[in-house]
Image: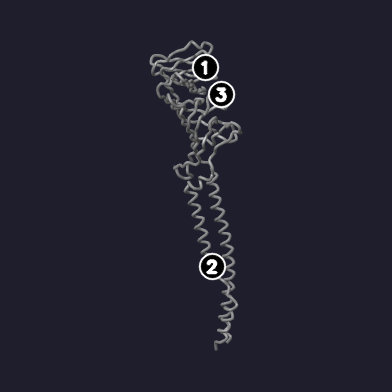
Amino acid sequence: MKYAALPIKLFSLISGRLRVKKIEITNLSFFMKLFLLSIVVGSIGYILISDRENIFTVRGETENITIVFSNDNLNQWDLSDATLLLDITAPDDLVTLPIDSFFMPNVDTTARVVIRNQESKPSQLIITLESDGKSVGEIETADKVIQLPRYAEITIDINQSRVLPLDGYIRVGEDVGLGVDSLLLSGEVSIVEKQFFREERYVATEHKLDTGDRVELHNSVDIDSLAKAKGFIRITSSNPLAFTIHGEAKAVKVHRLGSNSYHITPSIWPRITNDPIIAAFSSLLAIIFLLLEFADLIGKLLFSPRTADEKDDESSSIAKKP
């Protein structure tokens, strides 16, 4: 009979150890969940708020546009049949440029391009050039090179389509006010964002512009620093200036009449639906929690304590044994 109690003692010892093991597994499962949750949520948060390579595109129609030229060979304008004014104090002293005349601006030269509509005559394109240096640039013709002074004005009758490329610091539109007769007519801003790990891109934001807005690309939201951009102006006889501008920037600054200026920046919400790495991390998080819950269920089945009825049944069966 003394050996009959050994199985009961052995079972009690094993049950006690299993209950301790269950507590340890439960605690381990909890801390593992917390650890994995911290890693996955932290990774998703980092991906959402991390800086991306953003290409801002501004396109629309305007009656004026201003550019400060950079040092780029793209800035070559065809001024065939244009009229050149070199001295503002002598408005009648004009020079008519021949066909195949090309303007080459100097760095930091400012050009203001305005379209002037006339009822009985073709529309005119007025290009005003200014520079703080000695010259705004030069005009190359078939037989000579014309060195321009610090100020020049160019007038072109729009009787055929033209395209003027742009590379530099660009401002579209003017603030509405006294003496302003040319405005941004319409436009939109779109932001094309790069995915976190891949070279593919998606449209993150689209924003409509109002008539009278003034638009600039900026390198920072906090600092008033213009961003370099590329683009072109398409000029036709029947339409205003159609423009398209592309640039890597941090924001587009919009000056709007009747309100403070504001910035258009990328939002984190399009990243959730368009960046596959975030979808992958979210799926991984769901799979991890599913596996941990399954492990908890197995642990409860294997290591759950016996109920009172089970103990009574076990004691009765042992007592009945001879």
What residue is at 58 percent from the left and 35 percent from the top? 262
SS for dot 1? strand
Tell me which amino acid carries mark 2. Answer: Gly
**What residue is disc 1 on?**
151
- Labelled disc at residue 299: 2
Q: In this view, does 293 lie to the left or right of 163?
A: right
What residue is at 41 percent from the left and 14 percent from the top? 144
- Labelled disc at residue 23: none
On screen, residue 267 above or below 279: above
Nearest-to-viewer mark from 1 and 2 = 1
Q: Where is residue 103 in the image (x, y as percent from the top left)?
A: 44, 20
Q: Which residue extends farthest front?
A: 120
Nearest-to-viewer mark from 3 and 2 = 3
**What residue is disc 3 on?**
180
- Kindly tell me whether residue 241 is visible in this rendering: yes
On screen, residue 92 above or below 13: above
